[in-house]
Amino acid sequence: MPQPSFKSAVRQQESLLAPLEKKTLLWLARRMPAWVNSDQLTVLGFLGMILAPRI
């Protein structure tokens, strides 16, 4: 059985704040230290979700 090929997902930003969000994400990405990787950002987001209701 052939393996499905990888398809790159297209991010659709259609909200009212989408232009501001895109500029902010680009600003953050340019200033992110090289040693920070996607796994670390995922853990940070997960911890934020857990801790947010308790603050």
Image (tube, grey):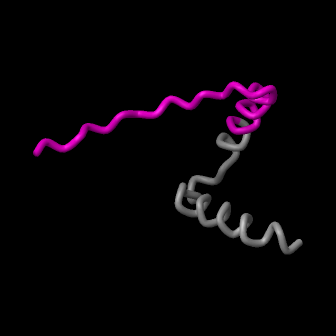
Residue located at (54% from left, 55% from top): 38
Check the image and report above or below for 22 versus 47. Answer: above
Q: Quadrant of residue 25?
A: top right
Q: Nearer the viewer, residue 24 or 46?
A: 46
Asked if the magenta segment contains residue 13, the reply would be yes
Query: From this viewpoint, which residue is outermost toward the left?
Result: 1
Residue located at (66% from left, 50% from top): 32
Number of labelled discs?
0
Q: Quadrant of residue 44?
A: bottom right
Bounds of the magenta span? 1-26
Residue 15 % position (x, y): 75, 28
Q: Would residue 3 appear left or right of 34 to someone viewing this image?
A: left
Residue 39 % position (x, y): 53, 61
Residue 9 % position (x, y): 46, 34
Q: Would residue 43 appear left or right of 52 to someone viewing this image?
A: left
**What is the chief secondary structure element of the magenta stretch?**
loop
Check the image and report above or below for 7 versus 14. Answer: below
Check the image and report above or below for 39 versus 6. Answer: below
Q: Would residue 45 appear left or right of 34 to someone viewing this image?
A: right
Residue located at (31% from left, 38% from top): 6
Q: Quadrant of the N terminus?
A: top left
Residue 35 % position (x, y): 56, 59
Query: From this viewpoint, which residue is outermost toward the front?
Result: 1
Query: From this viewpoint, which residue is outermost toward the bottom?
Result: 54
